[in-house]
Image: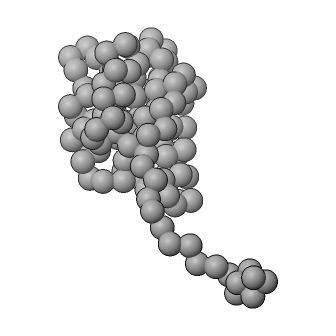
């Protein structure tokens, strides 16, 4: 996927397997963008397929968990693999609720 080969700008959309993220990716596709779409669930591959159209955008799915450092690195690698600059970025990955564990040093100060 390169700008020269498609002549289209590149958008990266996270949380794109369903819901608002998928709709955002669809809007970018309709407005002439190629896409890198990301989500942590296996539905991202099917979602990418749904976004492809005849003579339409090139779509690269990336199944990554953006709550982890490795997941972020994998998404960055997927974007860099396009060899293109990012023209638009829609960060829609949901935030997980997690339980914070206090470090012993902080807990003892209270």
Q: Quadrant of residue 30?
A: top left
Q: How is the image coloured?
A: one colour
The reply, left or right, for residue 26 in relation to residue 103 is left
Looking at this rendering, what residue extends furthest in the front direction?
Answer: 110
Residue 74 relative to residue 43: left or right:
right
Residue 38 visible: no
Q: Residue at x 33, y 35 (%)?
A: 20
In which quadrant will I find the N terminus?
top left
Q: Residue at x 48, y 17 (%)?
A: 9
Measured from the top left, where is residue 35 in percent x and y? 40, 28
Residue 1, placed above or below residue 41:
above
> Left of 46 or right of it: where is 84?
right
Q: Position of residue 16 (x, y in %)?
A: 34, 39
Vertical comparison of 3 with 74: above or below: above
**Vertical arrangement, residue 78 with respect to residue 95, above or below:** above
Instruction: Answer above or below: position of 96 versus 3.
Output: below
Task: Decide which of 6, 89 is in the foreground and name it.
Answer: 89
* Residue positioned most to the right: 109
User: Could you tell me residue 73's position as x and y percent?
Assistant: 55, 52
Residue ID at (58%, 78%): 101
């Amino acid at each position: 996927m390169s700008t020269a080969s498609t002549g289209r700008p590149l958008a990266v959309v996270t949380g794109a397997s369903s819901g608002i993220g998928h709709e955002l990716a669809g809007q970018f596709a309709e407005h002439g963008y190629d896409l890198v779409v990301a989500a942590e669930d296996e539905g991202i591959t099917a979602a990418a397929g749904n976004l492809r159209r005849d003579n339409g955008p090139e779509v690269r799915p990336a199944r990554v968990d953006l709550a982890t450092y490795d997941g972020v690195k994998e998404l960055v690698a997927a974007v860099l693999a396009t060899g293109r600059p990012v023209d638009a970025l829609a960060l829609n990955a949901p935030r997980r609720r997690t339980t914070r564990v206090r470090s012993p040093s902080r807990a003892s100060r209270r």
